[in-house]
Every structure is written in structure tokens, then in C-alpha cells.
Image (spheres, rainbow, N blue to C red):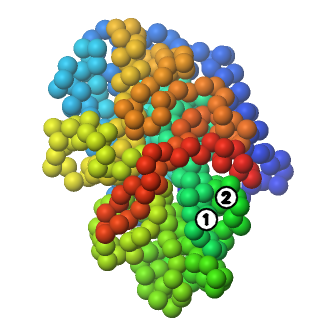
Amino acid sequence: MTGRRHDRSTFLPTLTRPVRAGIRTAGVLVACASLAAGCGLIPGVSGGDGDGPITVMTWAPEDTNLTNKPGMPAFARAYARWVNSHGGINGRKLHVATCNERNDSVSAAKCARRAVKENAVAVVGSYSQHANSFFPILESAGIPFIGGYGITDDEFTSPLSYPVNGGQPALLAGLGQELADDCGPVSLVRPDTIAGDELPVMLNAGLKARGHTQADDVRAAEDATEFSTQTRSALSGATRDPERTGCVLSALGDRTGTFMDSFRRARAEYPDVRTGTVLGSVDQTVIDASGGRSGPYEGSFITGWYPVETDPRWDGMKKVIREQAFTDTRIDPADAGVQTTWIAYTVLKAALDKIGGGEVSPDTVRRTLDDGMEIDTGGLTPTLRWKFQDRLASIGFPRLVNTDVTLQVVREGRLVSARKGFLDMTKTLQGADV
């Protein structure tokens, strides 16, 4: 969860997350009630009717100096080709418009306005840190946001959001809970941003669940190009107890590799520590590029949302890649963004299949998903079903419906399962000190 920190006006009261979520939800519902046309309630205004194509949009940052997710829109286009080569959806072609979000609030808003202009019935499988820029535009047009990457609070609060994973909150809580018994002092290196401020809270919820003390919070600039200061601070904190092996955890997105370069150079000056991170900061491609079994990730524990890439439950996604994008190097089946996009389009197709030959619009897609529909993702997630207020509404995440995480470890340079099955983080997150 990232995004630059902005100063808050001293003339406005600070709201807790549950209150902000409630106000936001109420505001959207009031707007939809009073401005029906603006929320996509006029039949036939989006997606077309009859035999015309169904338009959706996928966006993600590409070619930037920060986090890039080119595989997400590339896979979305491949998925559309695959669907259309097999007869489309209910006989209608699927048109996927894509947009470069550029890790920029202005570009994120432009992508959202394009989605409205092109009559998209949903934004699917997308990545953006700038929810404050794009959600108001989608909400005013009533366009659902299906399967974002889970890096902003809005993805778990907006009634138009349909997240398919537990985002950074579940990953950090899971990492803390699983490493608490094996770690002495813990240091977390994370972005010094608004969303980054959430990360130690969730990690500490996991540590607290197993009776562990809080982690040291080591902040780094989001666009940092070296981490020598943060590395030494993290190692000093993690090795302060000579009786127990400490842990250094990182959640820096694409900057994790840069941090690990600094870490590898400095760790020889300190006692041994364990390392851990979250999927999205590290995947098999990053492990390979850093030296595989001889690299800094060997032995690291990593929490993820889904089964490892070698699991046969990914065969459907791999078939799409094999048939439509085999030579596209942007699409890595081990990338969490590509995996999330596959699951998001699985949700979209299930909703469209249920609509059948009826009108396809933002409104009908939303109503279908909101009407108690349960979506089977083939075991990649628990059965997905969104309610108006779900189990984690008490901590300000009313739309967070999938709190399952997996625990993986790097062994001989390969990312493999550290334990079977999923870990449900619901109770752990409910105990977060928010």
C-alpha cells in the first residue's frame, strides 16, 4: 500500500478509518439515489446491447521509475483474444481497453475518465496507488472496480470495489503471525508514505496474535535508489538480542531488490538474521535475477495471496498465455499482478455469464455481484461473495472478503510452499490496533 503523504489541514477533524469508510459509503449511495443517470442506471448506456462488444478497461503503470506492472494490461488483452477466439461471452465479443497509469495521480484520473468515455462496464484487474484520483470518477459513473491489487484503503471501503485478495493488510498480518515464533527482534523496512503507514500496524497485528513485541519501523523514501542507512538501522534493531535470531522484513514493492543489494553488502558485519517479505515485492523472476540459490532471498519467507505458480490450479491461466501470448515477455505467470488479473476476469466472466442475454451495463454488473452471487475461482481463492458490510467493517475494511494468505519460502533458489493450504487472517486483522 503506497501513496505519497499529504499534510492534513489542522482545521478539519481527523476521522478514524471506520468513520471515513461509513461516510464514503453513505455519500456514494446518496449520490446514486439522487443522480441515477450518473451511476449507470439508464438502460443501455454502457457496454452496448444486442450483439455489440462488451467493453471493459484494465490499467497499470508501465515504463516508470517506480513500480511497473506491464503484465496486467498485456494479460488482459491476451484474455480478450482467448475469450473471443472461443465464441466470446454469450455470443458477444469482449473488448479490453488498456491505459498506462504511470504511477501518477493525473494519469490515473485520465484512465478513469477514459473508462467512462469508452462506456466500460467495469475496470478489471488493475493497479494504482492513486485511489483518491480515480475512485471518485468511477463512483460518479457507477463503474465497478473488480480485482484491484489491494494497495489502497479505498479498494476495501468503496461499495463499487470488488477486491479478490486481502491486499497488503492480509500479507503483513500473515507474515507477522507466521514468523513470530521463530523471530527475536523484528525490523520492518517500508515506504514512508500514507499507505506505508498502514504496514507496521498490520504486521504488528500478526506479531501480537502470537505474543510477540512490536516491530521496529524503518522508513524509506518511496523513490529511494539506495538503502544503506535503512539497512544498518534494520540490522541493528534485529540483532539487539544476542539470545535470539532476529528478522528483517521488507515491503518496498519494486524497490525491494535495491534494498536487498544494500542488505547483502552489510549483513556480514552483523549476526545472522532471518529475512521475509511479501509477494508483489518479490517473485520468482526477482529471485532468479538476484542469483537464485546464491542470492540474498535464499531461505526468505514470503506471504502471498495465492498458491505457488507451479500449482495445477493455474493451468487455466497458463493455457490462455500459451495460446495467446506465449512470446510476450511482459506476462509472467508467477507475477502476482498477472495472477490477480486472471482471477478478476474470472469474476467478470461469471457475472456476465449470469447476466446472459440481458443488458450489460455498469449497473447490471454491480447488481449481479451484489445480489449474493458466489464465485468459484477454482481453488485459487475461497469462494468470493461481496456484502455491503463484511467481517472487517469494524476496522474500516467493509469490502475485504478474502483474508486468506499462503506461506512460501525460497529453497535452492525456487519459491515453494512452506506449508499446505491457506491461512485465514480474519481474526488477526480484527485485532489490529487501528
Identify the element where label 1 is drawn: loop
What residue appears at the point 43 percent right and 86 percent down from the top-left corner?
265
Q: Nearer the viewer, residue 129 or 355?
A: 355
In the picture, residue 153 is in which quadrant?
top right
Q: Nearer the viewer, residue 95 or 424?
A: 424
What residue appears at the point 38 percent right and 65 percent down from the top-left corner?
410
Q: Position of residue 345 (x, y in %)?
A: 36, 32
Q: Position of residue 158 (x, y in %)?
A: 61, 34
**Is the residue under label 1 in contact with that under label 2 (CB below 8 Å)?**
yes
Where 348 falls versus 286 (above or below)?
Answer: above
Identify the element where label 2 is drawn: loop
What amino acid is found at the position of numbered circle 2 in the picture? Arg
In the picture, residue 98 is in which quadrant?
top left
Question: Distance from label 2 to label 1 (Cα)?
Answer: 7 Å
Q: Nearer the viewer, residue 418 or 87?
A: 418
Return the disc, 2 or 1, that comes first in the chain's sequence.
1
Reading the image, the residue beneath label 1 is 181
What residue appears at the point 21 percent right and 31 percent down from the top-left corner?
82
Instruction: Look at the image and tell me whether residue 57 can be seen.
Output: no
Q: Is residue 64 left or right of residue 148?
A: left
Instruction: Look at the image and tell me whether residue 344 can be seen.
Output: yes
Reading the image, the residue beneath label 2 is 210
